[in-house]
Image (cartoon, rainbow, N blue to C red):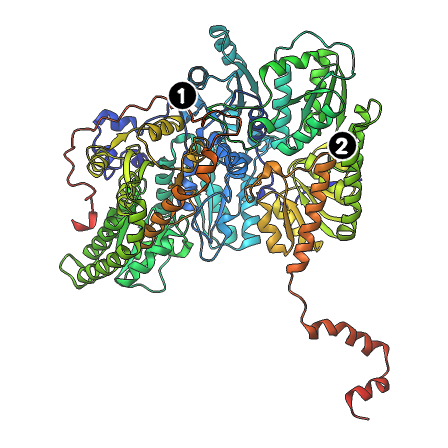
Amino acid sequence: MNPDVFSEPACGHNAGKSAKQRKAGCPAPKPGGAAGGCAFDGAMITLVPITDAAHVVHGPIACAGNSWDGRGSLSSGPDLYRRGFTSDLSEQDVVLGGEQKLYDTVLDVVRRHRPPAVFVYSTCVTASIGDDLDAVCSAAAEHTGVPVVPVHAPGFVGSKNLGNKLAGQALLEHVVGTVEPDLTTPYDVNLLGEYNIAGELWDVEPVLARLGIRVLASISGDARYRDVAAAHRARASMVVCSKALLSLARGLEERYGIGWFEGSFYGIAATGDALRRFADLLEGPASALRARAEQVIAEEEAAVAVALAPYRERLRGLRAVLYTGGNKSWSVVSALQDVGVEVVASSGKKTTADGVDRIGELLGDGGRVFADASAPELLAMVHELKADLLIAGGRNQYTALKGRVPFLDINQERHHAYAGYTGVVELARRVALAVENPVWDQVRAPAPWAPAPALPEPAAPPEPLALPEPLALPEPLAVAGGAR
Amino acid sequence: MARVVAGAHRGSLDPLKHSEPLGGALVFLGLHRTMPVLHGSKGCASFAKALLTRHFREAVPMQTTAVTEVDAVLGTEQLLAATLDAIAAKQRPEIIGLLTTGLTEISGQDLEGDLRAYRERHGDGPLVVEVSTPDFRGGLSEGWSAALEALVRAVPLDAGPGVGPGAGTPVAVLVGPTLVAADLDELRDLFTAFGYDPILVPDLSGSLDGHLDDAWSPVTSGGTSLADLRRLGTCPLVVSIGTAARAAADALAVRTGARVLHHRHLTGLAAVDGLVADLLIGAPPARVARARARLADGLLDAHFVLGGARVAVAGEPDLLAAAVELLHGVGAEVVAAVSPTDAPVLAGLPCAEVVVGDLADLEDRAREGGAELVLGSGHARAAARRVGAAHLTLGFPAHDRLGSQLRSAAGYAGSLRLVVDCANALLEHHETRPTPARAASRAPSDAIRSSDVTAADRAPANGRR
């Protein structure tokens, strides 16, 4: 495996670590407390939204069988990415090797679907038995004339985040730079870590288009293989809400001189910020593009203010507990504040030290920043802080419902798009629909035979996460390579 | 009798199969205060948990040992012990179902040895039932079968069976993976109606039927309790419903000396009659007789719609058998029957061929056979759409529709519901299909005229006399 993925210099996690901590890599899960996906899951999250490609999983049935067509990333055209293809190893294959079966499966898939490319994923079992993925991929590519890309991210090497990174590496090594785009403009950009969940990309692209900015490659959301392969011709990249693809951004900069920045499309301020950063990277801070960006931002913000006004009235005083990770733990706080919701607690998991600072600043004195929390701990916090709703990932949805607490899904399984200016208004609408739904009064009412409403006993709340000392980082989230 | 053939693909294109650990975990999810633990990479559990959560629309308890690359090489004994300790201390289950995966099976972990050491140190902990469920062998039904058998072999039993069977007798009812909560309810009612005291193992109708409890629980709440599992030792009769429960029923009967009866499935008049005949003591209760009369009438109503209808079915072996026999019984033509794994029950099905394959096989054969209705999991919906057929969700996962646990298909009432749903799906499909244009609809009669009548006869119509 590429050791770079553990020592990414652009990753804020690493900047704050001692040499020893850096050597130890990303933290290992505690026995009995492990949750979340594996590296293979992460690699699939990053690459499967290349919608016209075929994604073949080399492993036993569980890896593909339990995961195919389970992702919320939408396509405006091809739907090959929603199909499940796997070599489906048997006991005999494990003993004798699964290379021939993988080869045959890739050929079957190419014959049947004629994709522009095939991605092949290794898994714990095939990595352990020593199948030569690279050899099978090059043989299959030669035979079919279609690029066959090996992705080495077996589940047991680490977390979902690591898998995102390894997928980025695979793109750098095998895909980006292999195709020249039919057309380029000086305003072509890449979005890295934008997965078009619930169609979020489609709310962002039109705003960028108002500036004349064209998304050449979204890695990966509603992506086409040729566009990703031509991503080296972009003039700027934005790493969207993800530390995991920093190494891809840095690789694109080193190899092709593409400047980049980290940003978010959640919230009015973050979206405006992203537009400005793009303008600055593409033409400079004193440019006509920057002036156009300011004009578009002013117009969009005025329109959003009008659309949000009734919601801000309705949602005033509403209290929410937010549990998400990475850059989203501060950018979504900002988006929620835009729509008038008071965030009384937010997690700092998978966030860098400056990210935790940022959450702390946004929440103010009354807010609580916590580390990891289990589902019952979250419920306890909702009760203790008298919150009106829980905003978290799908894994906590049913826990919230069992606690009769309104819930909004903010992670990858969500069904609604919250990015950009349109997304802020949708967020307001969905928060209102969640808390104002008449169902809550019904299910909280006691049964005819019960003397009083039976509310869940709150468990002990988790320890608040101590706010670390401010770190001597260059500037919060201003690692923009292209500005150098 | 059907010919059982292999599908067209070496790998799997749109898999129909699910893994053994998933099937095994389902057994433990049907036991009260239980935690299934997947011994493998943490993705093994997170993917399975995510899929089960989408299917049941419920929080699904599941833990992982989170084996890493390094553990796979150096051994997992300490990791396993630490995981079991943490779960016993934190979630406090009464039963832990420990399921291996492909990773831990190939890395040669000595699970039994590891557990022996653990048990010596913690004699009074939860009952740990270990099951060998490598992902690269079998499928959901085989994993279920292995876990259920391991459970009835491992569970401590109360003293041996009394005499019987007779009214009030406890009966061990071991079920397969294809019965949903509503099926289990009906099954329990059927036994109770005849005066028996059924112990359903496992019982997903108690744990994952979708019910709003007063409090949230980190382990299963509802399902077969450990006390009831002990009582299996007192049952003079063991009944298996589904071939995936057969091995476990035999193992239990051998342990206790009970009489054992096997039923492949409980769908259709003949299948339910078979079980009722076994249970019958004197005259049947009025409500059972009424339910049978309704099913008989419903089959008659449905035969007008489903007679001659071309149907494609995909599912776990027992469910496939249930659906194919029910549909064949009202005159439908099964043009495609696809099972994820081979099983003895398949060869007896009343269709020409059963394919052991994937959903691409289902799609190809449904298209070739001109299927009008596709029965299969939520994953089969896209295939049905591409073929231009109606789709009725049946089997796992049913993530495309609400209420998967209420959609019964077994017992007199459940069979009636399934056959009525099939007929209605077909009616709706025919109603919503675009009506042929008028000119097009006249074409056949024009064609008849041109072939059956002479040119002279046709002349007046042309106005050229």
Rendered residue at 76%/38% (across/down): B268
Q: Quick check: do tags 1 and 2 share a chain? A: no
Q: Which residue is mark 1?
A: A31
Considering the numbered disc 2 on the image, is that residue within a helix, a strand or a loop? Answer: helix
Rendered residue at 24%/24% (across/down): A20
Question: Mark 1 Cα within 10 Å, few/some/many (few <14, many 20+)?
Answer: many
Query: Where residue B153 sits: x, y (%)?
Result: 64, 15
Please give left or right for residue B95 compared with residue B258 in the image: left
Q: B61 or B455, which lies in front?
A: B61
For the residue marked with disc 1, what is the amino acid? Pro
For the residue marked with disc 2, what is the amino acid? Arg
Q: Is residue A60 visible?
A: no
**Residue B446: quarter of image:** bottom right
Chain name for mark 1 = A
- The quadrant of the rendering that contains the N terminus of chain B is top right
Q: B276 or A417, which lies in front?
A: B276
- Seen in the picture, residue B148 relative to A160 is either above or below; the reply is above
**Residue B352: quarter of image:** top right
- Seen in the picture, residue A361 relative to B35 is either above or below; the reply is below
Question: Mark 2 Cα within 10 Å, few/some/many (few <14, many 20+)?
Answer: few
Query: Where residue B50 sits: x, y (%)?
Result: 48, 35
Please give left or right for residue A309 compared with residue B465 in the image: left
Q: B12 or B332, which lies in front?
A: B332
Q: Is residue B353 visible?
A: yes
In whole angstroms, how far apart are the C-alphas of marks 1 and 2? 52 Å
Q: B115 or B72, which lies in front?
A: B115
Query: Where residue A478 sits: x, y (%)?
Result: 19, 44
Q: Which residue is mark 2?
A: B287
